[in-house]
Image (cartoon, rainbow, N blue to C red):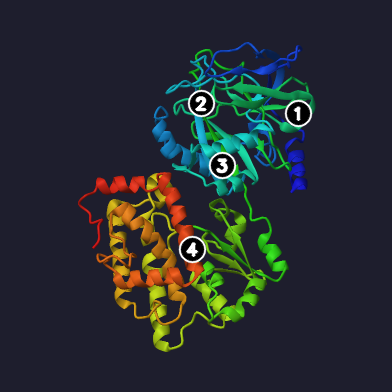
Amino acid sequence: MANARVLARAWAQRPKRMVSQVVTLNYQQPDPGGRQTGRYIGQPDKGDVVDVSAPREVVMHDARRVEPAPRLSTFGFECRSWPTQVEDFTDDGKIRRAYYDEMADLVRAASGASLVLVFDHTIRDTANSNLNALPGGSAAPVPRVHCDYTAEGAPRRLEQLLRSGELYEGSARRQFEASEIETLVGSNFAFINVWRSIDPDAPVQRQPLAVLDEESVDFDRDAFVYELRFPDRTGENYSLQHDASHKWFYYPHMGFDECLVFKCYDRKEDGPRFVFHTAFDDPSTPPDAPPRRSIETRTIAFFPRLETTEEKATHKGKELFLDMKCSNNAARIRLWLNIATDRVEERRGSVDDRIQTRVVEYPDLATDAFQRINPLKKVPALVRHDGATVFESQVILNYLEDKYGNRAFTLDTPEERQVADLMVRCHDIYVASPNCTAAGFSHCQGSMYLSAEWHGERRGMTPASRAAKLEELWKQVTFLDRYLVGDPFLAGKHVSLADLTWYPTCCFMEYMLPRVFGWPQLFDHESEHTPTPRLAQWFNFATNADPAFAAVRTTILDYWRDMDEKGQFDPIVNEIKNAPNFKWLYP
């Protein structure tokens, strides 16, 4: 990888025709008296920092003449054609609803990131003189050589942003669990900015943006910390003192459909990490050139990986089960592994020795490593001892039953097995449809918790669609209550795959159907008003039959209570209030 990068740069820097011009850039010098370099933002200047420019002449090269074209992986910056559907950049709401999604897609395409979060943007206008954006307004271009983050400050800023609740995944604001934050902070990540003109009628001529080839910078000699002192925190970026070896580039006459993508920090050290940049006065700018209006969008690109856990498991001859605590389908596998009834006790040593569990988080699902395991990027998944992968929960259960369980969860008679198979089939087709990853499609169980405001337009649904899916849920639970023929379990005297399948999903319904839609509690077996009394009796028996059932229930209920406190169900509750003509309450 490193050799390929060296070859690419050598080819790019071979002698060739290149247009260049001499321009003046505003560098800085560290204060001889030892005072901190920086400035106050949003509060009075206390006089204990200095901010003095040191203008220097440099040669500015036309990046459009570099062959092959610079890329993030070789230079730390690149220019891409990336049209936008946004026309009005004065509306912050439209920018967050539509433009953020476009920029996340662009950064993924340019960087290969598995997850991209957008956290803010700045509109800049050469008609302004203020460097910092005012509320509802724009800022002037920054004519100072700088890089937005330092090696020490970037990880701190990442954690602040993850805890802030102000990050967007596409157009939807994203909240993170403590465990997710820990995973992301420990992952490979990069701060990547995207800069574009927002004038559809004229290319950029005034104060274009210049970017510096990082390989021409001696960090120990040239770079130093510049503090940004906000009222609530102190940020850091890098300033730079001039050296004749610095090699600068810009893209002349950038149009409305072009974006300049550049790194401000990359945790990985095998390529460009810090791209210094600045606005500058272009001597070739015509006197009557229109003002430059631009938008700079700031993103965090993540490159998390499952490390080599699946490879380590294979090397040790173990199977690897990839679990997710809030997943009802993954809980089916967890129940199979943990239930210790007399029927399966004799196999426990074998399973514990041969199967290991790894709990994954949502960011892991977007990684290339996980996609190699399950192309649908869903849990549960299993890596066999020979490295082959298995996904879809019922397929995994059947595999485990055949290999380790001596069919311990498979019932004795053809009649019992038929009932159990039908219950599993109805659950998987009509409640947790396997096609839930298709754009614009949501499974029936998703009607309880998916919304465009929380999960993005791709996973949203109309009120009519939600109401129809909710009706299907009602049909399935009433069918289950009528068809439940076992005593005390769903299909017979013994626990079966039907019990493992339905129990976690019933935990979902136990919390969400009363909380969001006002349904009576389906699973309260002591209530005279329970519309599904046989189902409630089974649910209560299973909860007390083995600690594994109770543990799954506690995990699921705790998760949804936490998400409820964060507001996940509020958009759906509001939707119901605004759509009274649909049937939301059953029976």
Q: Earlier in the sequence, mark 2 or mark 1?
A: 2
Q: Work out whether mark 1 precedes mark 3 in sequence or the reverse, and give the earlier one.
A: 3
Residue type pointed to by label 2: Pro
Contact between labelled residues 4 and 3, with CB atoms less than 8 Å apart: no
- The span from disc 4 to disc 1 (Cα, nearest Å) is 55 Å
Q: CA distance from mark 1 to mark 3?
A: 25 Å
Task: Identify the residue at horizontal 44%, vertical 57% (top origin).
Answer: 557
Q: According to the image, label 1 marks what residue?
A: 217
Residue 107's tag is 3
The crowd level at tag 4 (other Cα within 10 Å; few <14, some 14-19, many 20+) is many
Residue in the image at 39% along x and 76% along y: 490
| Quadrant position of residue 435 | bottom left
Which residue: 40% across, 84% down?
416
Q: Can residue 83 be seen? A: no
Which quarter of the figure is the C terminus placed in?
Answer: bottom left
Name the amino acid, label 4: Val
Is 400 placed above or below 94 here?
A: below
Which label is found at residue 552?
4
Foreground: disc 2 or disc 1: 1
Residue 417 picture location, percent across and down: 43, 83
Question: Between disc 2 and disc 4, whose residue precedes?
Answer: 2
> For the residues marked 2 and 1, what is the alpha-carbon distance in whole angstroms?
30 Å
Measured Cα–Cα span from mark 2 to mark 3: 22 Å
Check residue 203 in the rendering and tell me which mark sits there, or answer none. Answer: 2
Above-or-below relation of 298 to 324:
above
Query: Residue 163 at x, y = what percent?
Result: 53, 39
Q: Three-letter amino acid code at disc 1?
A: Val
